[in-house]
Image: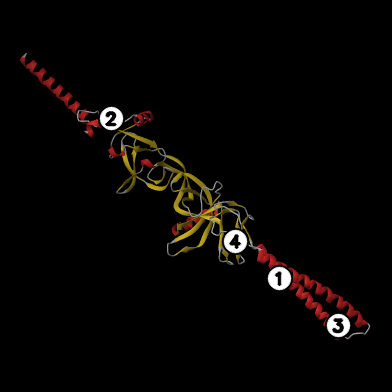
Amino acid sequence: MKSTGLALLIAGTLVLGGCSEGNTKKKSEPPPVPVTAVKAGTRDVPVLLQIVGRAEAFESVALKSRVDGQVSSVQFTEGQHVKQGDILVKLDPTDFVARLQQAEAVAARDEALIAKTRSDTARYTELKQRNFVSEEKVNDIRTNEATANANLRASKAAAEVARLQLSYTTIRAPITGIVGARVVFPGSAVKTNETILAVVNRVRPLLVGFSVPEKYLGRIRSARTGEEMKVNVSVPSDKAHQFEGRVRFLDNTVDPATGTILMKAELPNEEEKFMPGQFLNVSLVLETLEDAVTIPSEALQQGTDGSFVFVVKSDNTVEVRNVGIAASNAGMIAIAKGLVSGETVVTDGQLRLTPGTKVRIKESGERAEKAEKPAAMPEAGPSAQSPANAAG
C-alpha cells in the first residue's frame, strides 16, 4: 500500500510539473502586433517632374510716344482691363494740327500749279503743230509740268506725314490686356521712343517659364512626339488647387552654365488666378506607367539597404522586402520590383515589427473607433493648482 501511494504521488507531481511548464510557455509567447495593412493593387501612374517656374505675360507692350510732345490727358485707371484700340493717353495736338494745315496748303498750291502747267502744255503743243513755237519751247513746258507733278506728290506725302504725326498724339492699347501703373500725368513732357507712357500685359492666356535638367531632354522629346505634353500648375501656398496647361515651347539650346533647358507652358488663365512674375509649382508629365503595382506611401520604409516594406505572409507573420520605386504621385508609390499585385503590406504599426513577427490586421471599424476615441485627461490630484492658487 505504501508503494502504491508513493507512485501516485510521483505521477501527480510530474503531471503538475508538465502543466506548469506548458503554462509558462504559453505566457512567454507575445501576442500578435495589431497593424493596419492593405493589398498592393495596379493602376496607371503618371511619372511627374516637379519644378518651380515663373509666370510670364503672353504679350507685354511698353507704350512709347512716336512724337515729341506734352501729355494733355491720361484716360485709363491703374489695373484697368483694356481692349485693343482703347485710348490710353492723349498728347497736346495743337502744334501737329498747324503742321498738317500748312502741309495741306502746300499740297493745294501744287495742285493749282499742276493744273496751270497742264494747260500750258496743251496750248504750246497745239501751237507747235501750227509751227508758231519751237520744239525746244514745248520741251521746256513739258518739263515744267513734270516738275509740278513731282512737287505735288512731295507735298501730298508731307501732308500725309503731318496727318500721321497728328494721329500719334492719341496713344491706343495695341493689345487686349491689363494696363499697369500710371507713369505720366497731364503736363508731362514726352520724348520720341524714350518716355514710357503705359505698360499693357496680356494675361489670358498666360505663359509659365521653367528650366528642366538636361538629363530629361530625351524623355521630353519622346513625350512631345505623341500627344501634346500636359502640365499641372499650382501656387506654392495652395497645392490642392491645380490648373492644367500645355507645353508650347522647348528652347533650342541647353544653358551651359546651369545644365538646364528652358521650356514654356501655356495656361488659359480665364479667371486670372495668376499674374506675370509669380512663382508657380509646375508638374510635368513625362510618361504614364500602365498597370503599375502600387501601394500607399505610408507603407514604404527607408533602411540602410534602401526602400523596403513589411509584407504579411499567409501565416500572419511579416517579412522585410526590399523594393524599387518607379514613381510616386498623389500619395501612391509605383513599385518597379520586389512586390506583386495582391500581396499585403503593412501601412501602420511598423515600429513594433521585426522579421517573423506575428501580426493581427485591424478591422476598419476598429481603426475608426481608435481614431475617434478622445485622449484621456490626467486627473487633478492634490498637487494640481487652480489658477487662483497658482497666482497666489
Residue type highlighted by circle 3:
Val
Q: Residue at x 81, y 74 (%)?
A: 113
Q: Which residue is mark 2?
A: 377
Q: Quadrant of the C terminus?
A: top left
Judged by depth in the image, the label closer to the viewer, 3 or 4, is 4
Q: CA distance from mark 3 to mark 4?
A: 55 Å
Question: Is there CB contact under 8 Å for labels 4 and 2?
Answer: no
Q: Which residue is mark 1?
A: 158
In this image, 325 relative to 192: left or right? left
Q: Which residue is mark 3?
A: 138
Secondary structure of the residue carrying tag 2 is loop
Taking depth in this image into account, of 99 and 172 the one nearest to the observer is 99
Q: CA distance from mark 4 to mark 2?
A: 74 Å
Q: CA distance from mark 3 to mark 1?
A: 30 Å
Q: Earlier in the sequence, mark 3 or mark 4?
A: 4
Residue type highlighted by circle 1:
Ala
Q: CA distance from mark 3 to mark 2?
A: 123 Å
Whether residue 165 appears in this view of the structure is no
Residue type highlighted by circle 2:
Met
Q: Earlier in the sequence, mark 4 or mark 1?
A: 4
Judged by depth in the image, the label closer to the viewer, 4 or 2, is 4
In this image, 252 relative to 41: left or right? right
Q: Quadrant of the N terminus?
A: top left
Which numbered circle lies on residue 71?
4
